[in-house]
Amino acid sequence: MDRVSPETRSENMRRIKSNKSAPEMRVRRLCHAMGYRYRLHRKDLPGKPDLVFPSRRAVLFVHGCFWHQHDASDCKRTNRPKSNSAYWQGKLARNVERDAKNTATLIDAGWRVLVIWECETVNREGIRARVTDFLGPPGNGMPQNALPFPAKQF
């Protein structure tokens, strides 16, 4: 049995945003602070990846553990509502199936894909290491204050 009324549950679910969520914003801020530049939610790519690194042919998804059914044994955020369980089972299974299809399509098109789970975003250093391993060093390998050509005098 669900702890809240169906109306309250419906209102709670309706308030969950598809982008600019707290986990996504943590990853975006960290990537930017590390020196990576990216595009957001490109609609021309399958699944509208949260962060797109075009020059690196790489995309990053920040998945909510509940909505995308994180299967890690230590993740406590994947519990399904007890009421209307048939609906939720089908809905969440379709989400997982769609994620797999989008990932496969991106890989077939030559993109590299990284998924960061909501529960992982609290570990800032862990995310930093995964992003660096996935993308390589930020920028073009030059110090950020170095110019590739002499500055023009105006």
Image (spheres, helix red, strand yellow):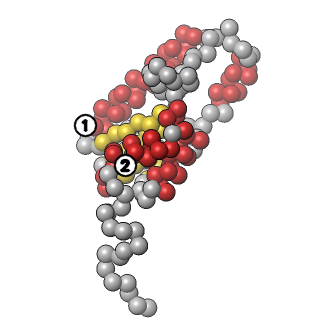
Question: What mark, if any, has residue 135 been given in the picture?
Answer: none
User: Mark 1 = which residue?
Assistant: 108
Q: Residue at x 59, y 41 (%)?
A: 22
How would you rate the neighbour count of disc 1 (Cα within 10 Å): few for under 14, some for 14-19, many for 20 or more? few
Disc 1 versus disc 2: distance between alpha carbons? 23 Å
Q: Residue at x 43, y 59 (%)?
A: 35
Pick whichever, 62 or 85, lies toward us: 62
Amino acid type, callout 1: Asp
Quadrant in the picture for residue 116: top left
Q: Position of residue 135 (x, y in %)?
A: 34, 49
Pick whichever, 118 or 103, lies toward us: 118
| Residue, far bottom | 154
Q: Position of residue 28 (x, y in %)?
A: 50, 49
How would you rate the neighbour count of disc 2 (Cα within 10 Å): few for under 14, some for 14-19, many for 20 or more? some
- 149 relative to 77, above or below: below
- 71 relative to 137, above or below: above
